C-alpha cells in the first residue's frame, strides 16, 4: 500500500530539463515526482526560450540562480554547488534526448529521460555503457507500466493461469492527427519532422508503450523476427508514418501483432492489449485502467477490479485508496517515479540486491524500444519484409 510512508531515506535533489510551460508532458513529470516527496525540484532549464523558462521556474518555486538558460548551464552550475542536483528529468523533443542524457551522465547525474531514449540503438547502448561505468540509473518514462492491473496481468501470466501464451495483440491508435493539425501546432509539428522526431512517428511515439507493457506482462517472449508496413495517410508527413502495422514472431510458436496510428478517426487512445493463452485470455485498455478482463474458455468472463483483495500481492502493493475509487495515469506515473527513486537510492548505496528487485523502465527498456523501432523501419522501408531480430 502507498500511503505517504517513505521507501527511501530522503528526497532526491532534482532538476528538470524541458517540460516547460504549456508542454504536453512536463506537468505529469512534476506531479509524479513530487507526489510522495521522493524528489525535490531545485533546478531547471525548462524551456527553449530562456526567459519563459525562468519565469515558469519562479512559479514552480525554483530559486532564480538555479533557473538556467539551457541544459549546459544547468549541468555546469549544479556541478559547482555542494548541494547540486543528483538527478535530472529530460522532457524535451526526441532529438535532444541523446546529447542531454550523455552530458548529464558524464556530469555524474542519474537521468530520467522521455522516450524514445535515442534515435539509434548504438547511441542507446553507448548511454547504457556510460551509466554502467559510473553506477548511474537511467529511467525511461514508459508511464503506463505501473497500473495495478498491469501487475495483476503479469502475475496471472507468470502463474500459468492462461496456459502457454499464443498471441499478443496490441494497439495504440488514436485519431487526434487524422488531419494535418501540425500546420497550426508546433508541439505536433516536431513529431512529424525526422530532424526532431527521429526515424519514425507513431512507432516511436505511441507503439513502444504497449510494446513495453507486453514485455512486462510476458517477459519470456522475445521477438525473433518482425514484419512492418507503415503509411503516411497525411502525405506531407512522409517519410514518417502516421499509421503502422507490425507482425512479430516470438520463435516459440507465439505471435504478436501491433497496430499503431494517429489517424484512427474518432478514437481517443485505444491503447489495448489482449494476451491469448491456451486456456484463457486477458484484456486491458488504458481508458479503463482500473479493470482487467479475464476470459477463461467455457466460463463467463470476469472483470477484475483494482484494489480488491482477490488480486495477487504484487497488484495490491501499489494500491493507494482501496477498491472502488478510480486511480489513473497520475498514480501509475507516481509509482514509476517512486520506483526510480528507490533504484537511485539503491545505486547510491551500492545495494545491488535491492536494485535487482525493483521493476522500473531502465536503460534496457529504453534500448529495447529504440531497437524495435529500428527493426520496424528497416522492414517497412524494404517493402514490408521479415527482418531477423538482433
Ligand atoms: P512539447 O513540444 O509539448 O514540449 C517540449 C518542452 O521542452 C517545451 O517546454 C520546450 O520549450 C522544451 N524544450 C525544447 N527543447 C529544449 C531544450 N533544448 N532545453 C530545454 N527545454 C527544451 O513536447 P512534449 O509533448 O511535452 O514531449 C516531450 C517529450 O516527451 C518527447 O520526447 C515525447 O516523445 C515525450 N512524451 C512522452 C509521453 C509519455 O507518455 N511518456 C507523452 C507525451 C510526450
Image (spheres, helix red, strand yellow):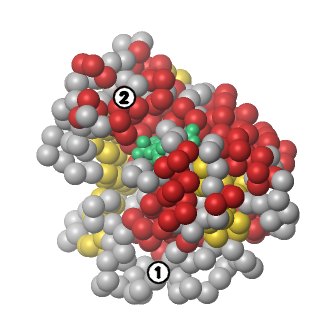
Q: Are marks 2 and 1 in contact (CB under 8 Å)?
A: no
Residue for point 64% across, 50% down = 68
Residue for point 27% across, 43% down = 173
Residue for point 67% across, 79% down = 7
Outermost residue toward the left in this view:
266
Q: Secondary structure at mark 1?
A: loop
Residue 167 appears in view = no
Outermost residue toward the top in this view:
382
When the figure is inspected, residue 102 is found, relative to residue 31, above or below; the finding is: above
Where's residue 153, x and y in %? Answer: 43, 64
Q: How far separated are the C-alphas under marks 2 and 1?
A: 38 Å
Residue 174 appears in view = yes
Does 335 sit left or right of 364 as displayed? left
Does 389 sit left or right of 380 as displayed? right
Q: Which mark is residue 319?
A: 1
When the figure is inspected, residue 2 is found, relative to residue 129, above or below; the finding is: below
Q: Which mark is residue 192?
A: 2
Does 309 sit left or right of 109 as displayed? left
Does 226 sit left or right of 169 as displayed? right
Q: Secondary structure at mark 2?
A: helix
When the figure is inspected, residue 87 is found, relative to residue 180, above or below; the finding is: below
- Judge depth for marks 2 and 1 and give the one in front: 2
Q: In the rendered view of the protein, which quadrant contains the C terminus?
A: top right
Amino acid at each position: 500500500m502507498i500511503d505517504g510512508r517513505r521507501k527511501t531515506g530522503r528526497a532526491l535533489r532534482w532538476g528538470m530539463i524541458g517540460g516547460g510551460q504549456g508542454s504536453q508532458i512536463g506537468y505529469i513529470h512534476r506531479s509524479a515526482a513530487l507526489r510522495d516527496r521522493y524528489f525535490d525540484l531545485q533546478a531547471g532549464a525548462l524551456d527553449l526560450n530562456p526567459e519563459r523558462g525562468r519565469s515558469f521556474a519562479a512559479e514552480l518555486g525554483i530559486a532564480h540562480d538555479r533557473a538556467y538558460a539551457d541544459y549546459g548551464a544547468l549541468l555546469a552550475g549544479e556541478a559547482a554547488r555542494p548541494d547540486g542536483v543528483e538527478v535530472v528529468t529530460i522532457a524535451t523533443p526526441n532529438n535532444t534526448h541523446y546529447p542531454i542524457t550523455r552530458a548529464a551522465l558524464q556530469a555524474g547525474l542519474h537521468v530520467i529521460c522521455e522516450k524514445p531514449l535515442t534515435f539509434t540503438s548504438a547511441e542507446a547502448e553507448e548511454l547504457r555503457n556510460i551509466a554502467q561505468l559510473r553506477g548511474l540509473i537511467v529511467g525511461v518514462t514508459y508511464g503506463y507500466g505501473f497500473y495495478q492491473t498491469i501487475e495483476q496481468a503479469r502475475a496471472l501470466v507468470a502463474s500459468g493461469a492462461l496456459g502457454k501464451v499464443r498471441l499478443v495483440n496490441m494497439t495504440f491508435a488514436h485519431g487526434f492527427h487524422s488531419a494535418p493539425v501540425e500546420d497550426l501546432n508546433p508541439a505536433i509539428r516536431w513529431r512529424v519532422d525526422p530532424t526532431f522526431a527521429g526515424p519514425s512517428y507513431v512507432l516511436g511515439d505511441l507503439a513502444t508503450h504497449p510494446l513495453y507493457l507486453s514485455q512486462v506482462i510476458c517477459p519470456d517472449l522475445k521477438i525473433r523476427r518482425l514484419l512492418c508496413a507503415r503509411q503516411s495517410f497525411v502525405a506531407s508527413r512522409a517519410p514518417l508514418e502516421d499509421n503502422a502495422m507490425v507482425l512479430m514472431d516470438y520463435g516459440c510458436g507465439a505471435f504478436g501483432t501491433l497496430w499503431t496510428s494517429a489517424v484512427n478517426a474518432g478514437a481517443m487512445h485505444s491503447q489495448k492489449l489482449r494476451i491469448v493463452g491456451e486456456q484463457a485470455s486477458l484484456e486491458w485498455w488504458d481508458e479503463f485502467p482500473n479493470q482487467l478482463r479475464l476470459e477463461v474458455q467455457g466460463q463467463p468472463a470476469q472483470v477484475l477490479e483494482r484494489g480488491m483483495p482477490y488480486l495477487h500481492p504484487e497488484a495490491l502493493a501499489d494500491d493507494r485508496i482501496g477498491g472502488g475509487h478510480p486511480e489513473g495515469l497520475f498514480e501509475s506515473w507516481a509509482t514509476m517515479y517512486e520506483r526510480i527513486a528507490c533504484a537511485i537510492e539503491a545505486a547510491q548505496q551500492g545495494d545491488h540486491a535491492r536494485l535487482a528487485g525493483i521493476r522500473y523502465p531502465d536503460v534496457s527498456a529504453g534500448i529495447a524500444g529504440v531497437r524495435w523501432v529500428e527493426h520496424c523501419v528497416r522492414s517497412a522501408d524494404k517493402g514490408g519484409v521479415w527482418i531477423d531480430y538482433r
